[in-house]
Image (cartoon, grey):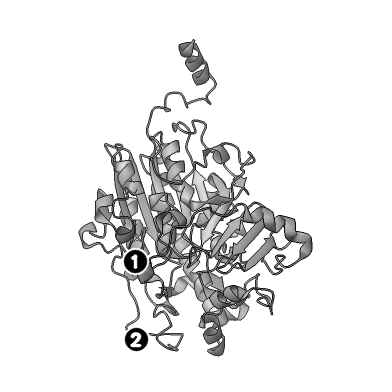
Amino acid sequence: MKLILALAALCTLPCGVSNAVERKPNVLFIALDDLNDWIGCLGGHPQTKTPNLDRLAASGVLFRNAYCAAASCNPSRTAVFSGLPPHRSGLYRNPQKLREVLPQAELLPRYFSNHGYWSAGSGKMLHYIIDPPSWDDYFPDKAKDDPFPRTFYPKRRPVSLPRAGTWQYVETDWAALDVTDEQFGGDWSVTNWISEQLAKKHERPFFLSCGIYRPHEPWFVPKKYFEPFPLESIQLPLGVKDGDLNDVPTEGRRIARNRYFAHIQEQKQWKKGIQAYLASIHFADAMLGRVLDALEKSPARDNTLVVLWSDHGWHLGEKEHWQKFTGWRVCARVPLMIRVPKGVPGLPEGTAPGGVCDRPVSLVDLFGTLTDLCGLPPKAGIHSRSLAPLLRDTQTEWPHAALTHLDKPENYALSTQRWRYIHYVGGEEELYDIQTDPHEWNNLAPRPEHASKLAEMRLLAPKELAPLPAAIQQTRSKK
């Protein structure tokens, strides 16, 4: 009977799938740094130019309600690669060191390597480290534990934004550079190496990670990427509203008013900053295009699963804020795209082009998703569910909320499909209906008519919070 059922199942697979189902798919794992929803298919800014992000989204499933596990680079990336959200790992802030907090963690590429894959990467995947034991190969040289290749930067800094004090991150600056992509290096070199790996035939399936650094600061990119965005035509972000912090509690205002936006306004650099961010996104998109083109020409073209994500979003004046670190949607929500070919063990039918999913999902679930899709055993001890059911049917029931941590265990945001809840230390709260208020302008938490929804959202909060180490509590990251 089992044999008959197995044969019947094979007969129901789409044409061409049954012969491929035993193959281990390759994985192309792409991260863009500090990218919010300013891409065409997410509609975050009307002037953005992202043809390659848009074509990747159109070829698979676009998650329009995806959230990072943490609102800064290190904890977000650590959650992705460990399968552990901050409230489980205890890593909440950029200054913490991954291997001090998780000395024995088997990260995602090593897990794949231990199950028969060749794991390699290039560029920034973890936070300013490579973590050499986790990879079989890396560019630049993994022994140096520095993920950045040579990049052209102006000799005299700052170029555009004057330094206002030691509190200011040295890389908060922007300029159009008179160099070619190749002369710029950086992401060009990263995507060149990745393209070279895609062109090769590999004896083992590969887990190949590509870390595109832009649009991370500094927003220095070749000048041709500035040209589509004349300064006189630059539009302000859609989510900007005067007095938007009036109904935000004290802790939210503390996080928002970090001095950057006020300084940028004083220096009359707001629109120049927006222009530079758009240019940096346009450059990052072009670098992504090089990788997608290389994959199309690759011998692995028809057996490679593609995942693209960003570690967190970015404010450019919304909520009077510049940078990241907040629980609002402009920072917590991230691009996420997944394309699955036919014949993979966890989704034999693959993903249909043009899929769109509005269920709330978390980047921490990428670990569980990839092991499930590739037919690897689930990793024990992690907190990462598979998104395969949503890849199969984007409208399927999904009773989960996405959790995003801020700088303290008690500061976090929860996202369902329609509602967002932000909790701060001391019990301060925010509540937003993103169906009617997508920019989160109206905090509904103080209103009696929303008391039942507030109570419902509180029930979704994590029951246990790993403490923030005492030695790190007084530090504050500037990047």
72 or 431: nearer the eye? 431
Give the amino acid type for the residue marked by disc 1 in the picture.
Gly
Is residue 107 visible from the viewing direction of this image? yes
Q: Which residue has dot 2 on it? A: 156
SS for callout 2: loop
Q: Residue furthest top?
A: 1
Residue 316: give x, y in percent of width and height: 56, 74
Q: Quadrant of residue 243?
A: bottom right
Dot placed on the residue nearer the N-terminal end, 1 or 2 = 2
88 or 43: nearer the eye? 88
Give the amino acid type for the residue marked by disc 2 in the picture.
Arg
Label total for image:
2
236 left or right of 338 in image: right
Identity of the residue drawn at 50% across and 46% down? 338
Identity of the residue drawn at 36% across and 47% down? 108
Residue 59: give x, y in percent of width and height: 54, 45
Q: Residue furthest right?
A: 449
Q: Which residue has dot 1 on it? A: 186
Identity of the residue drawn at 43% across and 27% down? 21
Indicate whether 375 appears above or below 453. above
Disc 1/disc 2 C-alpha distance (Å): 19 Å
Q: Which mark is residue 139?
A: none
Please tell me how crowded label 2 is: few (under 14), some (14-19), or many (20+) other residues with Cα within 10 Å.
Answer: few
SS for callout 1: loop
Image marks 1 and 2: residues in contact by CB distance under 8 Å:
no
Q: Quadrant of the C terminus?
A: bottom left
Indicate whether 448 appears above or below 173. above
426 left or right of 302 in image: right
22 or 258: nearer the eye? 258
